[in-house]
Image (cartoon, rainbow, N blue to C red):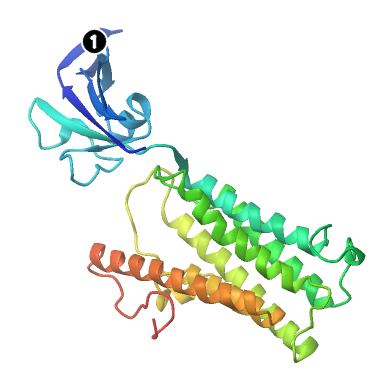
Amino acid sequence: MHCKISYLFYFKTFHKKKKKKKKTLFKINIKRIWTQWFKKKVQTSEISWCPYPSSSHYICKEKVSGCIILLISEGKPLRDEEILQELPVGTTATFYFRDLGAQISWGTVFLIECIGPLVIYLLFYFRLPLIYAPKYEFTASKHLVVHIACVCHSFHYMKRILETLFVHRFSHGTMPLRNIFKNCSYHWCFAAWMAYYINHPLYTPPYYGEKQVKAALAVFLFCQLGSFSIHMALRNLKLPGCKIKKIPYPTKNPFTWIFALVSCPNYTYELGSWLGFTLMTQCLPVLFFTVVGFIQMTVWAKGKHRSYLKEFKEYPTLRSPILPFIL
């Protein structure tokens, strides 16, 4: 449920002497007012002390969890790194806290999104009971491409899980818990749909046989290596705790040279991986998943591209959002 919280902060400074060291603290008197289920509640907390400087992230984490801070009730939320005591306000200021409700970190979101397809696909691959006819339970496909596809699909999501745990650096931002069902339904349902047909006992191999499978496998592996290289380059671009944004440029790694032409090569390589998987399996649900994913990644890439152009005046104009010279 969405509710608004209004906080009144009074900032006063004093010096606390301890071992001949001065420590500046800010006195905060918090007054909470909110309306919930048509019942108005008023609660005043005890006086608390916050160190200088206190960022909006510190207040939200230590004093009021699950909220964002606003200077104007209907304005934009303050960034995590903004210092409250340095904002353009007087000695007495009113801040508005908006309750975000149940939240979940982006790292957890990515893990849930990736673990689901990994497990679901394997259920169909091993042909567990109640999926196909009883005579096919726990049987293996006679087509080599089915086993290669399973390895590729599992490798892709295992790679994403490991990157989430050890490569990606996430901000303090969170996602509403209710959205996890929408995100998971997209990935999980598509995984079940494509796995059902690829591992079906009546599945037929690609039209051009082994040559088509080998070519598609080469495309898939190439793009997977490229995706990992881009993620590592983006990780090395910003040190832990650093808020300064930089323009990503090609490195000595050949897989990153695409940065010269594309703003979001991670999406380019992701698209290439699924095109390779589509060519390998020659399965309509996989093609549909690739098209939908391409549309969504294009939206994200265009947004990131606009952000780069707006933030960096010297941003290379030759770059396209996701496809070189095209899109």
Can residue 241 be spotted in the picture?
yes
Seen from the viewer's position, the closer of residues 216 and 262 is: 216
Q: How many marks?
A: 1
| Residue in view at x 25 percent, y 70 percent | 314
In this view of the protein, which residue sits in the foreground, 170 or 238?
Answer: 170
Q: Residue drawn 41% across and 75% down?
A: 262
Which image quarter: residue 237? bottom left
The quarter of the picture where residue 13 lies is: top left
In the depicted structure, whether residue 74 falls above or below residue 275: above
Q: Residue furthest left?
A: 90
Q: Which residue is mark 1?
A: 16
Locate residue 229 relative to residue 318 in the image: left or right.
Answer: right
Residue at the image point whose x is 79% and y is 88% from the top: 209
Q: What amino acid does circle 1 point to?
A: Lys
For this orientation, the residue located farthest to the bottom is: 208
Q: Residues within 10 Å of mark 1 (few under 14, many from 20)?
A: few
Q: Which residue sits furthest right?
A: 135
Element under disc 1: strand
Q: Position of residue 143 (x, y in %)?
A: 85, 78
Across and down, in percent, residue 267 comes to: 49, 70
